Image: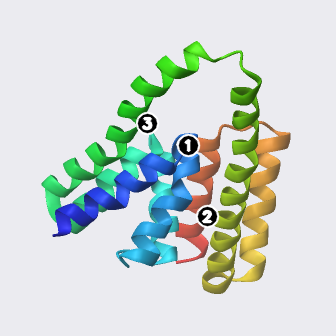
Amino acid sequence: MIYWQVFLAFFIPGIVGYGGGPASIPLVENEVVDRYGWLTVQDFSEMLAMANALPGPIATKMAGYIGFQQAGILGSVIGVFATVAPSLLFMIVLLSVLNKFKDSPKVKKMTMLIRPTIAILLGIMAFSFFQTSYENTGLWETIFLIVVSFLLLEKLKVHPAFVIIGALSFGAIFLS
């Protein structure tokens, strides 16, 4: 039964997570935190931070880690396959259809309507992470990390991997 649950936990976000890894993160969080209770919000945010620090697609790293945690090596394989399978199938079907209708105003409108939905989902997830961080770490530490990360990313154009490593180091040194 656990293999089926691992499959569904990543296949469903893979189907409805239009837009790639960032769009599917809140959906995976809903499955593994709310539906199955495999991780807490804090555990999920820590796993996501580590997955972001590693190279490669975020969704497959999450699926591999959580699948392994819940069902061993086979669970990891099932999780990664469940993450990739919907994209592969939809890509084959949709690319042939979209190629035929790429200049259609309806297709362009559909694409424009999906973007705000993804932005809202990412905003909700960011707020949830902020709330958890504030409750577990403290207000000033959370604000400090947010401000410094924003300045490094947006003003100084530091690569996100270095910002993540810096935040992990700050947490290891000052918050443990």
Amino acid found under the numbered disc labelled 2:
Phe
Q: Which residue is mark 3?
A: 56
Q: Is residue 51 left or right of residue 112?
A: left
Q: Which residue is mark 2?
A: 170
Q: In the image, is residue 54 above or below residue 94?
A: below
Give me the C-alpha separation between circle 1 and circle 2.
Answer: 34 Å
Q: Are marks 2 and 3 in contact (CB under 8 Å)?
A: no
Image: 46 above or below 96: below
The answer to which quarter of the image holds residue 84 is top left
Kindly give the residue lying farthest to the right in the view shown: 155
Q: Earlier in the sequence, mark 1 or mark 2?
A: 1
Reading the image, the residue beneath label 1 is: 18
Q: Residue at x 40, y 55 (%)?
A: 12
- Helix, strand, or loop for circle 2? helix
Using the image as rendered, state which of residue 151 and residue 114 is in the foreground: 114
Residue at horizontal 52 percent and vertical 55 percent from the top:
25
- Left or right: where 29 falls relative to 82: right
- Do labels 1 and 3 touch, CB within 8 Å? no
C-alpha separation, residue under disc 2 versus residue under disc 3: 24 Å
What colour scheme does the image use?
rainbow
Badge 1 local density, few (<14 within 10 Å), some, or many (20+)? some
Q: Amino acid at mark 3?
A: Gly
Residue at 45%, 54% in the rendered image: 13
Q: Is residue 123 left or right of residue 12?
A: right
- Foreground disc of the pair 1, 2: 1
Disc 3 packing (10 Å; few <14; some 14–19; many ≥20): few
Figure quadrant of residue 121: bottom right
Compare residues 60 and 13 and report the one nearer the observer.
13
Which amino acid, by three-letter code, is at mark 1?
Answer: Tyr
